[in-house]
């Protein structure tokens, strides 16, 4: 305890006495600092294990904290709209608004589907599509259906879930967001990651164009250098053909085609990287 202020009061005619304590406290483990407000009066009594009676106090801690589960770290890596809904849901869980928490976790899944452009009439079909499109394993999709079931009960049947159930859902959501938006970004500084879609390929390619390449005639292989092994043989052929097509269509103004059959280019300047999708090499 870092600081304490105590107040007392009474209504003698009614034999009523109360106490309020205000404390600034620090967790002995994580060292988080919180504000504790405690209230008790002489009518607040409860039975104990010895069949007797004892006084108790009501405690409120600010800011609220999770009594079950843990909040996701590296939340800044998650897309803004998903991040906002996640935070609102966790805040509801902190103040034990259990119905809103269940509905919020369901909304997080909806937001993920929207971000990944998974469009279907209902959430059940959208979750199945997340699996079929490779975003989730079969086991993960089954877990998301569990969140959907609990969210539906909260919204449509006004059935309040248990905190222990919501803690499990929070863990599932954390795992999902980590897999979709966080883990790969954390790995890119330390491990090679396969480039398996065209957007990642073009982003990687443009980021690898260096100042010393300007005015040179150079192939895609030479631009990629050691990063070439991140792209499978089939994808490399498809991605290269698509890139040549985009260059011919005038999408990129920093280079021009010299020899289409050899995918040979003349680099005129450095590419503008400001609008690129985030992909770290």
Image: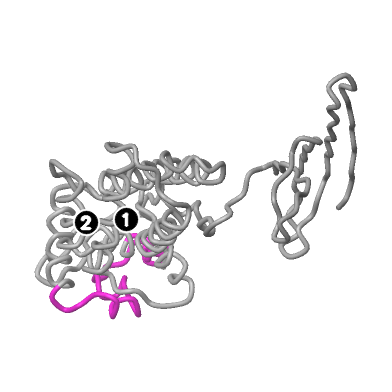
Expressed as whole percent of the image width and height from the top left, the position of residue 68 reads 54, 57
Magenta range: 206-234
**Residue 73 visible somewhere in the drawing:** no
Residue 145's mark?
none
Q: Which mark is residue 256?
A: 2
Q: How many marks?
A: 2
Distance between the alpha carbons at the discs numbered 1 and 2 = 8 Å
242 to the left or right of 93 = left
Q: Is residue 41 left or right of residue 176?
A: right
* Residue 171 seen in this snapshot: yes
Q: Where's residue 199, x and y in %?
A: 25, 58
- Which residue in the protein does label 1 denote? 268
Q: Between residue 169 and residue 45, name the one nearer to us.
A: 45
Question: Does residue 216 show up magenta in the picture?
Answer: yes
Where 74 sits versus 275, above or below? below
Figure quadrant of the C terminus: bottom left
Considering only vertical position in the picture, is 32 above or below 237?
above
Coordinates of residue 227 in the picture (x, y in percent): 33, 76
Seen at 71% across and 56% down, the residue is 51
Can you name the residue that lies furthest to the front here? 51
């Amino acid at each position: 305890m870092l600081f304490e202020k105590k107040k007392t009061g009474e209504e003698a005619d009614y034999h009523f006495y109360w106490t309020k304590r205000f404390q600034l406290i620090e967790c002995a483990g994580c060292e988080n600092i919180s504000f504790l407000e405690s209230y008790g009066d002489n009518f607040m009594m409860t039975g104990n294990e010895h069949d007797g009676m004892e006084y108790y106090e009501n405690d409120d801690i600010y800011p609220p904290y999770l009594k079950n589960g843990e909040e996701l770290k590296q939340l800044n890596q998650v897309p803004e709209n998903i991040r906002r809904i996640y935070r609102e849901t966790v805040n509801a869980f902190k103040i034990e608004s259990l119905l809103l928490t269940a509905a919020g976790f369901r909304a997080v899944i909806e937001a993920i589907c929207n971000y990944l452009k998974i469009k279907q009439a209902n959430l059940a079909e959208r979750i199945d599509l997340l699996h079929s499109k490779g975003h989730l394993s079969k086991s993960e999709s089954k877990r998301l259906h569990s969140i959907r079931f609990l969210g539906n009960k909260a919204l449509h049947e006004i059935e309040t879930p248990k905190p222990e159930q919501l803690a499990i859902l929070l863990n599932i959501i954390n795992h999902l967001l980590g897999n979709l938006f966080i883990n790969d970004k954390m790995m890119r500084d330390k491990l090679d990651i396969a480039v398996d879609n065209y957007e990642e390929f073009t982003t990687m390619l443009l980021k690898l164009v260096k100042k010393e390449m300007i005015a040179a005639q150079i192939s895609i292989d030479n631009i990629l250098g050691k990063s070439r092994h991140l792209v499978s043989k089939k994808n490399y052929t498809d991605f290269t053909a698509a890139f040549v097509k985009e260059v011919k269509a005038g999408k990129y103004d920093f280079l021009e085609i010299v020899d289409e059959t050899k995918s040979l280019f003349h680099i005129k300047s450095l590419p503008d990287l400001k609008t690129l999708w985030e992909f770290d090499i």
